[in-house]
Image (tube, rainbow, N blue to C red):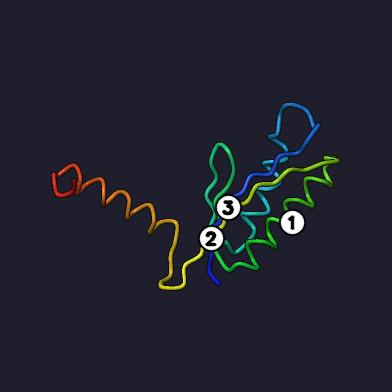
């Protein structure tokens, strides 16, 4: 099943800077076959359900291997069965809506 997920991994009691952990997870995501987008508070990924959760698990394990004794992860997942959905399509749909609204074609 194809899915789009957003997730954030937070090591607990690992100091203030999370940069090394984020960089390690970014490497894992970039080496995966998944489509990824990185943002200030996490990552968006799309692909097959099992692949998404495998990669999130790899990130979780890596953060622990880097010394984090405790890790808190939030995950949001969306799926559709009526059609294939991709992050880029969702963004394009909103952009199209806003263009139509600006032209006065939407209420």
Q: Mark 2: which secondary structure?
A: strand
Which residue position holds label 2?
46
Which residue position holds label 1?
58
In this view, which residue lies farthest toward the front? Answer: 107
Residue at image position (78%, 49%) is 62
The percent coordinates of residue 83 (x first, y second) are: 41, 72
Residue at image position (47%, 67%) is 80
* Eye-nearest disc, 2 or 3: 3
Q: Quadrant of residue 87?
A: bottom left
Q: Mark 1: which secondary structure?
A: helix
* Mark 3 surroundings: few (<14), some (14-19) or many (≥20) residues within 10 A: few
Does label 2 or label 3 sit earlier along the sequence?
2
With respect to residue 53, does 65 lie above or below? Answer: above
Distance of mark 1 from mark 2, alpha carbons? Answer: 16 Å
Does label 1 or label 3 sit earlier along the sequence?
1
Residue at image position (69%, 46%) is 73
The percent coordinates of residue 44 (x first, y second) are: 54, 51
Distance of mark 1 from mark 3, alpha carbons? Answer: 17 Å
Which residue position holds label 3?
76
In this view, which residue lies farthest toward the left? Answer: 104
20 displayed left or right of 7: right
50 displayed left or right of 69: left
* Mark 1 surroundings: few (<14), some (14-19) or many (≥20) residues within 10 A: some
54 displayed left or right of 35: right
């Amino acid at each position: 099943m194809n899915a789009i997920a957003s997730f954030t991994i937070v090591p607990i009691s690992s100091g203030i800077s999370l940069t090394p952990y984020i960089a390690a997870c970014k490497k894992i995501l970039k080496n995966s076959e998944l489509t990824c987008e990185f943002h200030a508070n996490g990552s968006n990924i799309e692909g097959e359900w099992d692949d998404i959760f495998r990669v999130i698990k790899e990130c979780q394990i890596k953060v622990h291997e880097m010394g984090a004794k405790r890790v808190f992860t939030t995950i949001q997942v969306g799926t559709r069965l009526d059609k294939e959905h991709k992050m880029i399509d969702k963004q394009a749909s909103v952009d199209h809506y806003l263009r139509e609204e600006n032209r006065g074609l939407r209420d």
